[in-house]
Image (cartoon, helix red, strand yellow):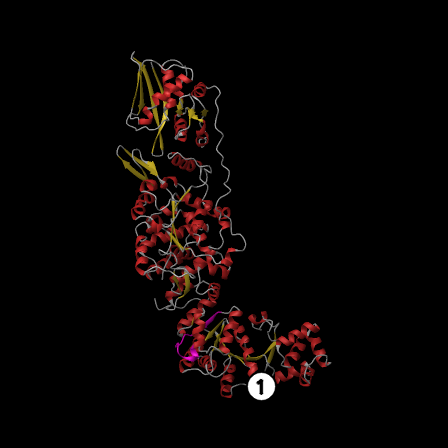
């Protein structure tokens, strides 16, 4: 006697269908689970048999072979309890249900209760692609509700799950809330900082990475935290990408359409930042920040190997983490915002407080920040402490108003095919530069205000400034602004 | 109405005192009436002066070849009209400039260095077709006028005496020369007014009020030139100062001005480039052609926030941040501005780096 149920395994952030086959034959009682199960999966036999009995069924006193397929995919956790139980009941002919049409996931209690597990969203994705009903623990409801176009049933126990598989008493999750978030850092709360805000607006419009430097207490963190509020809302597809990334580490975002903001501390490990860990690699901060902002405060305090580790995710938009037995690719298309003090004490450029750093310690600090990573920052501005006088007074422009401009600029780039951050030299050459713009660029290079390396970066920025102005051609003013935002020197 | 104004001004009373009387009695006509009737505490001399009918005064002016323009006249210097202590009108010989005008001022006890530079500035300003205004005094003033006259340009002298009383005597020929070459002699004092010490400081507000920028060539910490500079700042007129030896007494005022944020006035060519920028004239030098179109608002903002951050410049100019950033970028590339951290200031090596 044989039955098969579909469940799901996460490979990185990607959900893949897992087929759970149950075969009952032979007289000698016993249970064998095959197909790369980990310890938690192997323990499923005890939970499943107790839950089956508690739910008023019998656990077959024969030889039960449970195969998790594909056999080469490592499977972990207690999430296969429910599909195994359903498979056993179907194979022993205790229930007559078309199990070919369901995707099931969930941990069973000894009393037959169905408990929450990670991967609910992944199961919904698999259910959608295979056009099957998805049966999940109740707690997975909000997470799975990101997917609105596939049937989902919630169950609190094995018995309810069986009912749901029969198509009786199906409870569906509430659709996920997509309301605009309210309590969030907003540009209108930030006084002064005209240049920094403009720099962030331009950066947001073109997806450029930003380096903010300035003394402690200048407001760098506050500015960075407000960036998601001026970014375009995520579309459904991006929101799903983000939700999958978060679901992979067992987390669920409430404001799912708001671009994520991640601010890992400089004591983070490589695995926490990039992804990894022993066994199957787990997504890191770069993946949680996918389609959003990765903010590294105190950039100079991050160990050099961590900063170097960010190069691949930044360049490729994804990071491949290889471990014995599994190599996983995590998406990592984020906007990087770095904040740094100009020197160890932070007051080197300050106009009121004196710097107490020695020349050598400043030099060491700078060298740390002059690596290849820092070169990726298209926008570099100094953030000064705002004088007390500027802290009082009217509210500044709201994030919503800024976002309208940013959205328009991003839309122009979408029509061209890619974000300005990703424009290559050839694409830049083909942009409509007017004569004033070309002359100013040449002049900047000839006076060594601009290095060859900065050349393309300034041109990318100028493209974004022009997009913000709604201008197809790039003029001298756009280039001049880009030069300042890049941090041009005389 | 302007008749009564002329009659009042001819008494030589201070504009502020006159203003108070107008406030009290309602109009210039009523002020004349009040003085004549002895309802004010004025000397017999003043009463006699105000009695003379305007027609007689106008005839007197015509005979002397002098015009009188009231403060309501379009020719009256624009910046002066905003000041509560503006004169009711100006006495004028010759023609006022219609284009850009720059004040070149400084001490009377100048060094050869100051005289040479003042003359060169005057000539260079004339070479651009602009006008130079100064006070016809000894030292820097005279040298600047001489430069103007030598280059055949338009010059204007503002006096602390009547326009027919050229003072000091050794500059009488120079003053006449200014008028002959198309310039003007201006004063707020009536014909025949003698040069008195208290008449000189007030005329500085007229000098700065006529100018698009004030250039202080050499000055001690006290003196008319620094009064002119601070009046200029009040009026929103940019100030340039020529740096000099730290130990020289007559450079102290200028050096302090530079320290406090005045634009350094260097050799005449540099000065002209900066002034071109100021009035929005196209730059001459090829290398700096990029600041064509960048207007005086940025320079004016720099006067107040110098050196300053971009945020300071936004606050001073009231311009949108994008516009300020773009303008700053052009000027940095052009070498006019330089940046230290996030602080932008004028580049003392401006032009030398090309």
What residue occupies the far right of the structure in this picture? Answer: B37
Task: Identify whether B201 is placed above or below A37.
Answer: below
Q: Is residue B239 magenta?
A: yes
Residue under label 1 = B194
Residue B332 spot, x, y in % from top left: 39, 62
What residue occupies the far bottom of the structure in this picture? Answer: B169
Residue A145 spot, x, y in % from top left: 46, 31
Asked whether A205 or A371 is in front, the reply is A371
Under circle 1, the secondary element is loop
| Point 45% across, 24% down: residue | A156
Task: Identify whether A55 is placed above or below B232.
Answer: above
| Residue B103 visible in rendering | yes
Asked whether A403 or B262 is in front, the reply is B262
Residue B182 spot, x, y in % from top left: 51, 79
In magenta, the rendered stretch is B238-251
Q: Is disc 1 surrounded by few (<14), some (14 to 19) or many (20+) residues within 10 Å?
A: some
């Amino acid at each position: 006697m044989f039955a098969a149920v579909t469940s799901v395994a996460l490979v990185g952030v990607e959900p893949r269908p897992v087929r759970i086959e149950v075969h009952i034959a032979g007289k000698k009682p016993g249970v064998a689970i095959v197909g790369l199960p980990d310890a938690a999966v192997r323990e499923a036999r005890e939970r499943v048999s107790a839950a089956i009995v508690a739910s008023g069924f019998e656990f077959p006193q024969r030889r039960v072979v449970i195969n998790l397929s594909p056999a080469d995919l490592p499977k972990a956790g207690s999430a296969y309890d429910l599909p195994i139980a359903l498979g056993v009941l179907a194979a022993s002919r205790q229930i007559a249900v078309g199990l070919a049409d369901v995707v099931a996931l969930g941990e069973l209690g000894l009393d037959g209760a169905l408990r929450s597990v990670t991967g609910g969203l992944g199961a919904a994705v698999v259910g959608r692609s295979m056009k099957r009903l998805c049966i999940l623990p109740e707690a997975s409801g909000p997470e799975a509700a990101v997917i609105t176009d596939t049937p989902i049933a919630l169950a609190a126990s094995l018995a309810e799950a069986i009912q749901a598989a029969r198509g009786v008493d199906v409870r569906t999750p509430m659709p996920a809330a997509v309301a605009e978030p309210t309590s969030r850092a907003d540009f209108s709360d930030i006084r002064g900082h005209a240049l920094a805000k403009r720099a962030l607006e331009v950066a947001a419009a073109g997806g450029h990475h930003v380096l903010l430097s300035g003394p402690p207490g200048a407001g760098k963190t506050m500015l960075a935290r407000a960036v998601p509020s001026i970014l375009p809302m995520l579309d459904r597809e991006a929101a799903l990408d983000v939700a999958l990334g978060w679901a992979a580490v067992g987390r669920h975002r409430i404001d799912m359409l708001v671009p994520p903001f991640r601010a890992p501390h400089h004591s983070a490990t490589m695995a926490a930042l990039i992804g990894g860990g022993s066994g199957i690699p787990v997504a890191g901060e770069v993946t949680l920040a996918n389609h959003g902002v990765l903010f590294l405060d105190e950039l100079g305090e991050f160990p050099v190997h961590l900063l170097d580790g960010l190069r691949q995710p930044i360049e490729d938009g994804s990071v491949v983490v290889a471990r014995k037995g599994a190599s996983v690719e995590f998406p990592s298309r984020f906007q990087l915002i770095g904040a740094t003090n100009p020197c160890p004490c932070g007051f080197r450029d300050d106009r009121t407080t004196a710097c107490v750093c020695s020349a050598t310690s400043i030099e060491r600090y700078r060298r740390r920040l002059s690596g290849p990573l820092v070169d990726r920052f298209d926008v570099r501005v100094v953030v000064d402490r705002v004088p007390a006088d500027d802290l009082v007074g009217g509210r500044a422009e709201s994030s919503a108003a800024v976002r309208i401009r940013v959205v328009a600029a991003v839309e122009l780039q979408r029509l061209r095919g890619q974000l300005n951050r990703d424009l290559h030299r050839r694409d830049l050459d083909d942009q409509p530069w007017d004569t004033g713009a070309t002359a100013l660029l040449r002049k900047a290079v000839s006076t060594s205000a601009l290095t060859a390396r900065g050349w393309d970066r300034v041109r990318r920025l100028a493209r974004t400034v022009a997009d913000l102005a709604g201008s197809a051609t790039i003029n001298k003013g756009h280039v001049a602004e880009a030069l300042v935002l890049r941090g041009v020197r005389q | 109405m302007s008749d009564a104004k002329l009659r009042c001004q001819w008494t030589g009373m201070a504009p502020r005192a006159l203003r108070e009387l107008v406030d009290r009695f309602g109009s210039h006509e009523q002020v004349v009436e009040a003085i004549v009737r002895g309802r004010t505490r004025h000397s017999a001399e003043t009463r006699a002066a105000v009695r003379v009918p305007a027609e007689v005064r106008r005839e007197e002016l015509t005979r002397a070849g002098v015009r009188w323009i009231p403060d309501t006249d379009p020719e009256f210097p624009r910046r002066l009209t905003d000041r509560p202590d503006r004169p009711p009108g100006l006495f004028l010989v010759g023609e006022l400039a219609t284009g850009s005008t720059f004040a070149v001022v400084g001490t009377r006890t100048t060094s050869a260095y100051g005289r040479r530079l003042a003359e060169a500035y005057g000539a260079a300003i004339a070479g651009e077709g602009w006008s130079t205004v100064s006070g016809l005094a000894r030292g820097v003033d005279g040298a600047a006028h001489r430069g103007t006259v030598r280059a055949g340009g338009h010059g204007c002298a503002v006096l602390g005496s009547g326009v027919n009383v050229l003072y000091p005597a050794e500059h009488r020929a120079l003053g006449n020369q200014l008028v002959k070459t198309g310039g003007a002699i201006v004063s707020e004092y009536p014909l025949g007014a003698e040069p008195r010490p208290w008449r000189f400081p007030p005329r500085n507000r007229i000098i700065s009020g006529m100018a698009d920028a004030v250039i202080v060539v050499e000055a001690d910490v006290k003196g008319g030139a620094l009064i002119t500079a601070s009046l200029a700042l009040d009026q929103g007129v940019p100030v340039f100062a020529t740096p000099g030896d730290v130990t020289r007494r007559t450079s102290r005022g200028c050096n302090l001005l530079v320290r406090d944020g005045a634009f350094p006035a260097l050799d005449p060519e540099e000065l002209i480039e900066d002034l071109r920028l100021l009035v929005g004239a196209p730059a001459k030098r090829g290398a700096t052609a990029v600041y064509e179109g960048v207007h005086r608002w940025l320079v004016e903002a720099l006067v107040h926030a110098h050196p300053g951050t971009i945020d300071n410049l936004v606050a001073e100019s009231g311009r949108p941040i994008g516009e300020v950033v773009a303008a700053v970028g052009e000027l940095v590339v052009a070498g006019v501005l330089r940046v230290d951290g996030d602080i932008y200031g004028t580049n003392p090596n401006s032009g030398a780096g090309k």
